[in-house]
């Protein structure tokens, strides 16, 4: 009798859910158990040709889908918090969002972005925040490097992440500390072999050609994302086209002593008026990066603030800054933060530490595409050192800093809207 009663209750529950509860809401505020895996579920829904609503500025940038048992099962399996709500309740949510006075909007996600990560095939002695969070969120990606870029493979992809690469061809300027390390020797041999394969005498020339291919990718409508040293060295390589900025240990001959005067800032994405760090034994590339003695910050007080944008009028930066907090814990990298006076005026600043006059999170457009630069190495490891173990994201499922990376992953899936301005 008891079993029959429970069966009837279950049946009534299912009937009720099928009849009245037609949407699944995935809140992205403080109530969410696993923010990072929630992005993975949204990506999974897109992969199954189902519609995703990204509710900008609603409860931390929540997701909503029409109810489907497969989606609900996936949410349970991935331990992501969700609510099953009625059509009427969801209509009320949309009404709240569509209120002209509400700084909220609905962004339809309609395309599964094809993702590439630019990373060497050889083992590197450091982790990469993007590949770690993609793996944790169960979002698929391909690894590409110089061979694939030079073969013209980039147009196959919608989104490209630049691993912590040195695009100036100076091998991260790690010569002073790691020139005898097996990983460094392997990196040099791999780069020199690839350069010769494509007809270049120097690795610096190969890396410039790679950067220009990436620039073509962006101009054609691609989405480019970079962290740490891949940000400033990308722009430095563009500005230094035709100028030798590498010393003898990097490319076999000396650098141009007048290199600084020959930089062309009109070719860069984000930065202007910067000067090179000419010392080959100094791991810094230029004065773009705010140094520790200039920042006057410690791990205890290192934070940056996300800007709040108009969801209805500035949907792109709004998407890219969705988070359950607006104050993000800072983290260091070979390139940590960008000096504000060296940033071009047309660049959109999305996160900064105003007291230190530094910017941590930038966005801009180039041609038909966009780029995003994010300073620092690992949002949950303040000062990650070469050779350290990678961060275990199972311990950080609600990381605000990692959420910013995943905003960029989903951004290419958004249906383009006509701007209201």
Image: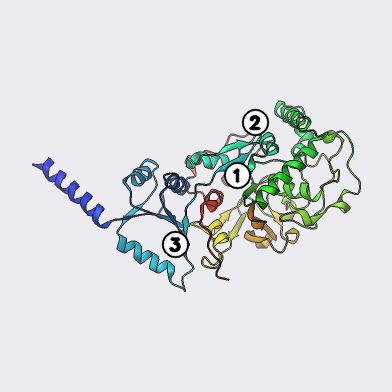
Mark 2 and mark 1 lie on one chain; the one further toward the N terminus is 2
Describe residue 135's horizontal placement relative to residue 63 as left or right: right
* Foreground label between 2 and 3: 2
Name the secondary structure under disc 2: loop
Describe residue 278's horizontal placement relative to residue 414 as left or right: right
- As drawn, the residue found furthest toward the left would be 1
Mark 2 and mark 3 lie on one chain; the one further toward the N terminus is 3
Image coords of residue 33 (percent x, y)? 41, 48
Asked if 408 appears above or below 350 in the picture, the reply is above
Q: Could you give the CA–CA distance between mark 2 and mark 1, rounded to whole angstroms?
A: 21 Å
Q: Could you give the CA–CA distance between mark 2 and mark 3, rounded to whole angstroms?
A: 41 Å
Q: Which image quarter is the N terminus in?
A: top left
Mark 1 and mark 3 lie on one chain; the one further toward the N terminus is 3
Name the secondary structure under disc 1: loop
Give whichever of 246, 331 is nearer the camera: 246
Image coords of residue 119 (percent x, y)? 64, 37
Crowding at dot 1, Cα within 10 Å, few <14 / some 14-19 / many 20+, comes out as many
Image coords of residue 170 (percent x, y)? 78, 38
Please give the label number shown on residue 232. Answer: none
Give whichever of 325, 362 is nearer the camera: 362
Q: Residue at x 38, y 68 (%)?
A: 95
- Residue identifier under label 1: 378
Q: Residue at x 87, y 48 (%)?
A: 259
Please give the label number shown on residue 58. Answer: 3
* Foreground label between 2 and 1: 2
- Residue identifier under label 2: 121
């Amino acid at each position: 009798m008891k079993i029959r009663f429970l069966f009837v209750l279950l049946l009534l529950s299912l009937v009720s859910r099928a009849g009245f509860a037609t949407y699944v809401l995935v809140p992205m505020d403080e109530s969410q158990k696993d923010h990072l895996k929630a992005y993975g579920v949204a990506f999974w829904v897109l992969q199954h040709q189902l519609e995703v609503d990204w509710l900008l500025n609603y409860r931390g940038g929540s997701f909503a889908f029409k109810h489907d048992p497969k989606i609900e099962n996936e949410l349970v399996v991935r331990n992501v918090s969700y609510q099953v709500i009625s059509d009427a309740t969801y209509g009320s949510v949309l009404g709240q969002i569509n209120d002209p006075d509400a700084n909220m909007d609905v962004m339809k996600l309609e395309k599964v972005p094809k993702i590439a990560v630019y990373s060497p095939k050889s083992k590197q002695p450091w982790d990469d925040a993007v590949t770690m969070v993609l793996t944790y969120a169960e979002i698929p990606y391909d690894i590409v490097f110089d061979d694939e870029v030079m073969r013209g493979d980039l147009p196959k992809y919608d989104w490209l992440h630049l691993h912590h690469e040195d695009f100036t061809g100076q091998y991260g300027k790690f010569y002073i500390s790691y020139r005898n390390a097996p990983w460094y020797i392997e990196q040099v041999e791999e780069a020199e072999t690839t350069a010769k394969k494509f007809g270049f005498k120097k690795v610096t020339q190969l890396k410039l050609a790679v950067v220009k291919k990436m620039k073509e990718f962006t101009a054609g409508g691609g989405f480019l994302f970079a962290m740490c040293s891949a940000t400033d060295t990308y722009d430095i390589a563009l500005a230094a086209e035709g100028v030798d900025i590498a010393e003898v240990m990097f490319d076999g001959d000396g650098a141009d002593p007048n290199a600084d005067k020959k930089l062309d800032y009109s070719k860069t994405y984000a930065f202007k008026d910067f000067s090179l760090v000419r010392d080959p034994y100094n791991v810094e590339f230029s004065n773009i990066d705010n140094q520790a003695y200039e920042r006057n910050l410690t791990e205890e007080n290192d934070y940056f603030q996300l800007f709040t944008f108009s969801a209805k009028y500035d949907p792109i930066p709004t998407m890219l800054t969705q988070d359950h907090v607006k104050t993000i814990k800072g983290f260091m990298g070979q390139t940590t933060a960008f000096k504000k006076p060296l940033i071009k005026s047309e660049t959109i600043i999305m996160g900064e530490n105003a007291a230190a006059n530094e910017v941590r999170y930038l966005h801009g457009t180039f041609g038909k595409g966009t780029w995003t630069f994010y300073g620092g190495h690992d949002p949950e490891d303040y000062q990650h050192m070469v050779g350290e173990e990678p961060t275990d994201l199972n311990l950080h499922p609600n990381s605000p800093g990692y959420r910013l990376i995943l905003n960029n992953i989903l951004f290419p899936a958004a249906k383009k809207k006509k701007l209201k301005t």
